[in-house]
Amino acid sequence: MEMERLFATEKVGGRALYKLQAVTVFLGICLVLCYRVTHVPAAGTAAWLGMLAAELWFSFYWILTQSVRWRPIRRRTFKDRLAARYGERLPCVDIFVCTADPRLEPPSLVVATVLSLMAYNYPPEKLNVYLSDDGCSILNFYALWEASSFAKHWLPFCRRNNMEPRSPAAYFAQSDKPNDPQALEEWSFVKDLYEEMTERIDSAFRSDNVPEEIKTNHKGFSEWGTGVTSKDHQPIVQVVIDGKDRDAVDNEGNVLPTLVYMAREKRPQYHHNFKAGAVNTLIRVSSVISNSPIILIVDCDMYSNNSDAIRDAMCFFLDEEMGHKIAFVQNPQNYNNMTKNNIYGSSPNVFNQVELRGFDGLGGPLYIGTGCFHRREILCGRRFTNDYKEDWDRGIKEKGNMSIDQVEEKAKSLATCIYEHNTQWGNEIGVTYGSAAEDIITGLIIHCRGWISVFNNPPRAAFIGVGPTTLAHTIQQHKKWCEGVFSIFLSKYCPFIFGNGNISLQLQMAYSIYSLWAPNSLPTLYYLIIPSIGLLKGIPLFPEITSLWITPYIYVSVVTNIYSAYEALLHGDTLKGWWNGQRMWMIRRITSYLNGGIDAVRNMLGLSKMGCPVSPKVSGEGESKRYEQEIMEFGSSSSPEYVIIATIALLNLVCLVGGLCRILTSGENMPLNGFFLHVVLCGLLVVINIPIYEAMFLRKDRGRIPFSVTLISIGFVMLALFVPLL
């Protein structure tokens, strides 16, 4: 008798409307390009050909984006069947949490994430939680030590109440006091314990010091001796809770998950390969402590929001029909601090609900760095074969004859700077080095080795994180991502080269959507500048309003934007949120993607070194208030990105006013005949940039655009007006 599947795959409905608009838009694009090629004017030829080049690029890129929209699928798991078939005989899981800088990622935030991961609805003896601290901060070790004590109360509290979420910070911020007196007493007791722990951690953080009397409570504190800095220190591996120790139990006598702190060795003369190096070190260190067949990788700000997330993943890995083909299970990124109208365009709804499901229909989603369950063997380089069979019983269940100190010393030897020399780590084994987007390139390589992945988006989100709350943080985050993915496209791992013959053409196209963010910057800049200057100087670059050739331009623009808004509204965004997203789409292209592309090319040419800045997870009181009010935050910085944003906004305002004045004073019968689309485009750009004008001229708060940026922008606009359109 055939076993029932542990998960179902369903086609996403309603594709007829999408396919109709896609086909008609494609025909419209062909007509737009036909017009450009057949109507080259005698005057302004260079500007016209530039418009043709920009429109060719936009057409090509639009085709790429359709690859993830053609046949999206959704997955549904059956945890009841998993329980009936396996009970508690489930594989062990190693959970990796990565943090890098306690100033940007406060220790109290990190331990709230760690506690949520320790509290999964899963056999605790099969959970092993590792914190990689790339900042080698004694404050993070102290916070983890505090969390190990609080966990003895927190884990039983979660089990008894079957509550969600299991991050104490999120739970107490969201939950109301229970009405039952007995439940209220327990709730208040645990809440007080958590707040007292958090206050001790925050107090140590504020003073940048752990009290001496506390340091005697664990031998691990002695690792931070004289000369230890974040960039120059020995390897540190400390087992804070040994889950194999029978005395390591909570206050109800239940086994606690293993909890390990790790700070890999760093020396100034050795490159540490950022997060990819940290994850690879965790793979090795965990191999001598727990060696579980499944590895979950989570960023320190992405707390577990669904206590059944591991069981969901196991429905895929343990499925008898398809499980042996699945390399990793990717959950979406969701944020708990999004404003209603998504002021910085950070809403992941369309990406999660449309694009990742589209990837899943092509062979699996890309690996996005967090919230992802991996098979250890595959992450370490195994290629797909039809006879592959996982050993689900693998995992170190006993220490053998080694003491915990000996285990730690063995693990430290795997976390040294020189361990990877003359090995395949970072190349054939582990997470791949050489890109700031180590997750994307690693997922691509796994797909090219013959494996598939699946996208799991349960009704209750598996992980919740923190999105950027200022414009500067948003620009920085996307610059880092853009630099990473474009460097992939410029390397031997280019999806169209490395993926050729290994993955489908559609999946190659899907990967290239993000790899080609950077080249979008130049045609976007051209389209934002040249038509506006053409309006001011009376040089038409679009069809006349009386010409039939204007029809495809209007059709393509209107239909693509209507469908984009429809997608956003369908998946939970507001109309204003979609509009804000369009503004941020423009801003990211002319700042993050421009600079990210330049840096990727410089890195490739050896003119600069790759960087991987950590995005701040906290913001100041004034910044937070303006974010909640959905007021764009510029701050006191006079960054080049702000100059670009302000210059483009001002240029379009000047060109619209100047162009309309020229048209109205021209004395022609149909003054708008040749410039209708110029006025519409320039007018829309002025409307979308209203928050920029407010920040330049009207606002008085500290988040406004600095006056120096406004002056520089005015200067650039004046220079741009003297540029001839040849």
Image (cartoon, rainbow, N blue to C red):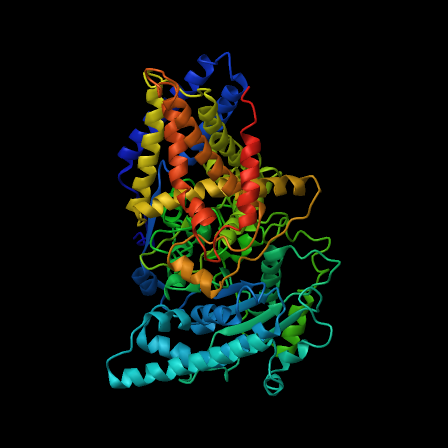
Quarter holding residue 238? bottom right
> Image check: 604 left or right of 482?
right
Q: Is residue 253 above or below residue 361?
A: below
Quarter holding residue 605? top right
What residue is shown at x 60% (from left), y 53% (from top)?
612
Residue 302 visible from this viewpoint:
no
> Image check: 232 left or right of 50?
right
Q: Position of residue 719 (x, y in %)?
A: 58, 32
Q: Is residue 228 above or below residue 374?
A: below
What residue is shown at x 60% (from left), y 75% (from top)?
208
Counting labels gives 0
> Image check: 3 left or right of 696?
left
Residue found farthest to the left: 179
Q: Position of residue 675 (x, y in %)?
A: 39, 22
Nearer to the camera, 584 or 43: 43
Q: Position of residue 623 (x, y in %)?
A: 46, 60
Nearer to the camera, 642 or 497: 642
Q: Position of residue 239 (x, y in %)?
A: 58, 75
Residue 99 visible from this viewpoint:
yes
What residue is shown at x 40% (from left), y 73% (from top)?
168
Image quadrant in which the C terminus is located: top right
Nearer to the camera, 564 or 297: 564
Q: Is residue 29 above or below residue 690?
A: above
